[in-house]
Image: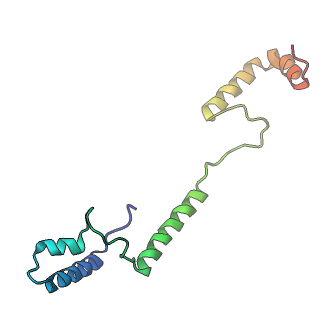
């Protein structure tokens, strides 16, 4: 919604129409303008404002742009086909590679037993 700017021309047109309708009332004051243009809790008129087709198209267009951005946004996953994933982030992946480099020879028997299902 940060890219939407208020339509000042439409607002001025609406305000002029409210002023014209309040001028028709005998002895109209500023409160009649407020009652016709600005609504509060005590106003009985509900949902009589219909947005223009241009405004609807503008909102739908913006929603479609946001939806496309959301669908296209994806973190690039590098080297995902390099076997089992034993990490939760890049730092953990780096740490796991260090552990494997230093302890691979000592833990090979344990990992083989776990793979076969014969670990005690």
Q: Is residue 105 above or below residue 18?
A: above
Task: Left or right? Give the position of 69 relative to 46.
Answer: right
The residue lying at 47 percent from left, 68 percent from top is 62
The percent position of residue 23, horizontal first and vertical second, equals 14, 84
Q: Residue at x 38, y 64 (%)?
A: 3
| Residue 73 shown left or right of residue 33 in the figure | right
- Give percent across and percent down for residue 41: 27, 61
Rendered position, 29 above or below 87:
below
Residue drawn at x 20%, y 83% as measured from the top left: 21
Which image quarter is the N terminus in? Answer: bottom left
Residue under the image location 30 percent in, 69 percent down = 44
Viewport quadrant of the C terminus: top right
**Left or right of 106 on screen, residue 31:** left
Between residue 10 and residue 119, name the one nearer to us. 10
Tell me where residue 56 sits by quadrant. bottom left
Q: Nearer the viewer, residue 71 or 96?
A: 71
């Amino acid at each position: 919604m940060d890219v939407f700017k208020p339509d000042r021309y439409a607002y001025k047109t609406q305000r002029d129409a409210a002023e014209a309708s309040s001028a028709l009332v005998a002895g109209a004051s500023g409160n009649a303008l407020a009652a016709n243009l600005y609504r509060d809790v005590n106003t009985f008129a509900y949902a009589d404002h219909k947005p223009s087709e241009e405004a609807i198209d503008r909102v739908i267009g913006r929603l479609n742009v946001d939806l496309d951005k959301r669908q296209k946004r994806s973190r690039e996953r590098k080297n995902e086909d390099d076997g089992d994933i034993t990490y939760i982030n890049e730092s953990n992946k780096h740490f796991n590679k260090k552990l494997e480099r230093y302890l691979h020879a000592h833990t090979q028997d344990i990992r083989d037993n776990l793979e076969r299902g014969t670990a005690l």
